[in-house]
Amino acid sequence: MLANSQPGTNKEVLKRHLELEQPKGLVQVEYVWIDGTGEGVRSKCRTLDFEPKEAKECPVWNFDGSSTGQSEGSNSDMYLHPVALFRDPFRRGPNKLLLCDVYKYNQEPTETNNRKSCADVMRRASEAHPWFGIEQEYVLLDYDDHPLGWPKNGFPGPQGPYYCGVGANKVYGRDVVEAHYRACLYAGVNVSGCNAEVMPSQWEFQVGPCEGISMGDELWIARYILYRVAEDFGVVVSLDPKPQTGHWNGSGAHCNYSTLAMREKGGLKAIEAAITDLEKKHMEHIRVYDPRGGEDNARRLCGSFETSKIDSFSAGVANRGASVRIPRQVAADEKGYLEDRRPSSNCDPYRVTEALVRTTVLHEDF
């Protein structure tokens, strides 16, 4: 059974209010941005007197950065620059979700605004047509930070029956997962699948294929939608890369990546060349694959539980214990994509995708 809703709220009462007629010509736009942790998202709503069709039609707005870890109180105004627009699956109708970049008072990007740099890299590499698909793993928790469905004074049975499992004794929180999937589709996120993962109460959804900067945009909004959906069910979402110590799988954000050359006939050679490039810059990638420069991934990339070792690079066909995996079908077709299994579940997808393109297409440092 899912956790109870927050005290003092009633979703049926809310539903009656949301069914009130919305005045013609007025639209609620939820401005969403990445906060000072580089992991969390914040949002606030604004009424517009028109329905925007593109993000650039929405006005630049501001917020108190001293309350989000992004400025000092004596100079707290930060600017929200609209970058990507989605349908709002919570308010529905003409209402929107609006992803924003954050800029300081001097119009310089904040320390956790990694989108600006990523967008520049994707523009310069546009002829390579880089495609990405990210497999976002996460864990559902109760309010006490205990994994959802786990015995309060013990542990569930060992891993084995939970991956892609079916049954009340094997999966916990499917309602959240199904609601999130449908909400993403409604919003316009290119969500391509979901499944129960190896650890009980651990799940995964996949976003992609997305070209260039849209990968980061869509994954961040998918995360925001997940947090909001889980909020409705009174459940907490954890993107911690190793939420449970011991003999339990951690959570990653495996990044499937290809360029046009990799996808064309004989593309396996381009894939192998990219892997050679990635090996040369292994530790540079490790430093940008989690928000704390590798500290979070050090708990997950231990050489077991379907992970590689953090301090060494490896690659192989169909090998889920490697840093980079070539899917078996890709090897058979001699074209396709590679899977970088190193990014942590709480990574910034802008940094991950930028690093991949800098290393394998632009051949430059980052």
Image: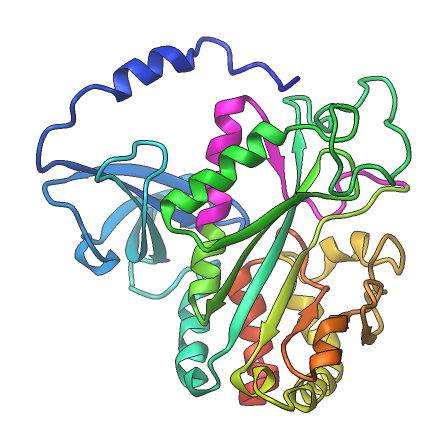
Residue 236 or residue 38, whichever sits in front: 236
Image point 78% across, 30% down: which residue? 170
- Comparing 41 with 232, the one in front is 232
Residue 21 vertical placement versus 64 (above, below): above
* Residue 349 screen position, x and y as percent: 54, 61
Q: In this image, 144 relative to 57: left or right?
A: right
Q: Residue at x 69, y 81 (%)?
A: 333
- Is residue 242 rendered magenta in the image? yes
* Residue 134 quadrant: bottom right
Quadrant of the rendering where the N terminus is positioned? top right
Percent position (x, y) of residue 63? 30, 44
Compared across the picture, whether 291 is left or right of 50 comes to right
Residue 354 x, y percent position in the rendering: 53, 73
Q: Nearer the viewer, residue 116 or 65?
A: 116
272 relative to 8, above or below: below
Relative image position of residue 299 (x, y in whole percent): 80, 52
Residue drawn 68% across the image and 75% down it: 284
**Picture quadrant of residue 166:** top right
Residue 119 visible in the snapshot: yes
Q: How is the image coloured?
A: rainbow
Q: Is residue 10 left or right of residue 339?
A: left
Whether residue 35 can be seen here: no
- Which region of the structure is painted magenta? 221-246
Question: In the image shown, does 356 or 182 lie closer to the viewer?
Answer: 182
Which quadrant would the C terminus be assigned to in this image?
Answer: bottom right
- Where 37 sits versus 112, above or below? above
**Magenta span contains residue 177:** no
Residue at image x 70%, y 26%?
A: 148
- For this orientation, the residue located farthest to the top is 8
Q: Quadrant of residue 27?
A: top left
